[in-house]
Amino acid sequence: MAERSTAAVDVADSSGDEPLTAKADQSTADGVAQNRERDTDSSESEETQGSGENENPGRTSPPELHSGHKLARRYRLEECVTRLDGFSSWRAVDEKLRRAVGVHLLPADHPRARSVLAAARSSALLGDPRFVQVLDAVEENDLVYVVHEWLPDATELTALLAAGPLEVHEAYQMVSQVSQAMAAAHREGLAHLKLTPGAVLRTSSGQWRIRGLAVNAALRGITSDTPQRTDTEAIGALLYATLTQRWPYEDDAYGLSGLPKGVGLIAPDQVRAGVHRGLSELAMRALVNDGATASRQEPPCTTPEELVKAIGEMPRIRPPEPAFTAPPEYQRTTYQQGNYGRPAPHPGVGQPMPAPLPPLQTRTGKALKWAVSALLIAALGLGSWQLADALMDHGKSDETDNTRTTDGNDKSGGNAKPVKPLTIQDAQEYYPDGKPQHAGDADLTYDKDSSTYWRTYSYRGGPKLAPFKQGVGIVYDLGSEQDVSAASIGLYYTGDHTTATLYAADSLSSSASLGSMTKIASGTTKTKDLKISAKKAVKTRYVLVWITAVPNASGDQFSGAGYKQAITDVKFTG
């Protein structure tokens, strides 16, 4: 695919050049002693490695705006979060849609105003929900401003690392989702070049989002001759930080301590005990370090696509088992002890046990007992008569049946094979066109938690996905060859209709041809529960759930309104 070039972003892949780790001593970081300009947002205190700016942006004064100022009679500025290099960033309110937004502001005569507009418009065309979306890019009244999403429920990676290293599964999810997102961006000709802990956010649902694609670099005039390598090394630095709570360079940055002077880049599992060995080697492969890696056996990863492939070759890291909390000991209350409304007993004073109530010895009590006894006797008599009548009818039917002849081939007898639930061992997203949906979430479809799910993107046309996309799906590994006869698929959205087909696959490969697979059965539903049953069981180890039609759903926190679907729970039986 031909790459889009803008004034702010150069995405030519020349990964053979000198890696950024070799230039660590030349880089400066916003927020360290070398930067004397004001920066009020810790998330924007990011390294300017590979900066190619020659102009002096300090000569252009940022526009004098204040809280309450309104842009385009719509965006009301609330709080200035960054003021740096002649531009400012604000938290604002879109009064038309009544939602929070972020706004970057700079004068129209700023030397980087044109490149910022170009970068913002290119980023907006991507439309990938894994990135914080650019909503507007305008030049008006001697001002240039870029409006983007504001995620109030998201937490910066900077804040997460302040509490300590991430749990191994969280680090795995972060590097998987960020790598896949950046690989998709580079396929469309866009680079980030400022991928730091402040640019990576985790939402309340556990999804990772990236903000500032192309725009953050354009605001600071950063360019790179090897953009893919730059972003790959940045992902490696993020993974290194999540594993060790250290920044993989000598200078401190983003609230993290750097490595000791003169030691060089050492593997994360040598910095902190208990680091996952596979993730440690992955971080070193991404950081390149002049070709050296943790094991010095695996080749370095110089593009996000290579990093995605390396992650796919790793053994899958499972989420931790939920900790079981023992329930509190049972305590009897005063009400249960028959003391409700009475004063508490004095310590050391024994309380007499209340005498049990005498049985019903009155005339009314005796009459009630006789009535109950009579009802029981009548019920027993009626039941005995009905049982005898049923036995007599059954005897007659047996005599009639005994006159029939059988050939011994009656398949409706008790020889039917019982239904057996099949255990799913692994799963991977299937995307033969090379464009995954959310490949890192495939294991959420069989984790026995209906609140987690794998979801598709939102499409403009439907319910049938073609011609936008032939289909979306997940391949499941049953561990060994099994007889597969049915599937139960839990869905997130209802309406219109959802259509899915089961195929017997040869492997978990995401690029295998659909024509090489054996069709098992298809099903359609308008509800959240899709049942698919085959006329005849098919023996296979790998089963593909291939969705070709999805319902229309309204917008939510992940994507806008459109045709989309999500899988919450998948079960197979044989």
Image (cartoon, rainbow, N blue to C red):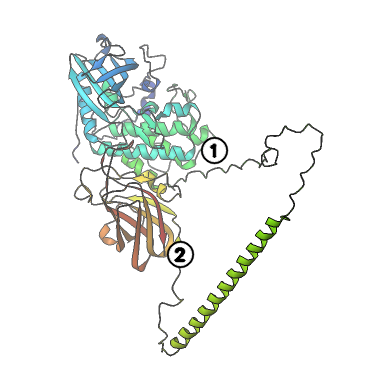
In this picture, is 117 found above or below 358?
above
Q: Which residue type does callout 2 highlight?
A: Lys
In this picture, is 151 found above or below 452?
above
The x, y position of residue 413, in whole percent, is 44, 78
How packed is label 2: few (under 14 Cα within 10 Å), some, or many (20 or more)? few
**Location of residue 273 (image quadrant):** top right
The secondary structure type at the circle numbered 1 is loop
What residue did someone put label 2 on? 420
What residue did someone put label 1 on? 274
Q: Is residue 189 left or right of residue 313?
A: left
Please state which of residues 149 and 130 is positioned toward the viewer in this rendering: 149
Q: Is residue 256 visible?
A: yes
Residue drawn at (41%, 44%), measured in percent from left and top?
A: 452
The span from disc 1 to disc 2 (Cα, nearest Å) is 40 Å
Q: Is residue 285 visible?
A: no
The x, y position of residue 404, in whole percent, is 41, 89
The x, y position of residue 58, in whole percent, is 28, 11
Please state which of residues 184 and 266 is positioned toward the viewer in this rendering: 184
Mark 1 or mark 2, whichever is nearer to me: 2
**Location of residue 193 (image quadrant):** top left
N-terminal of the pair, mark 1 or mark 2, is: 1
**Location of residue 97 (image quadrant):** top left
The secondary structure type at the circle numbered 2 is loop
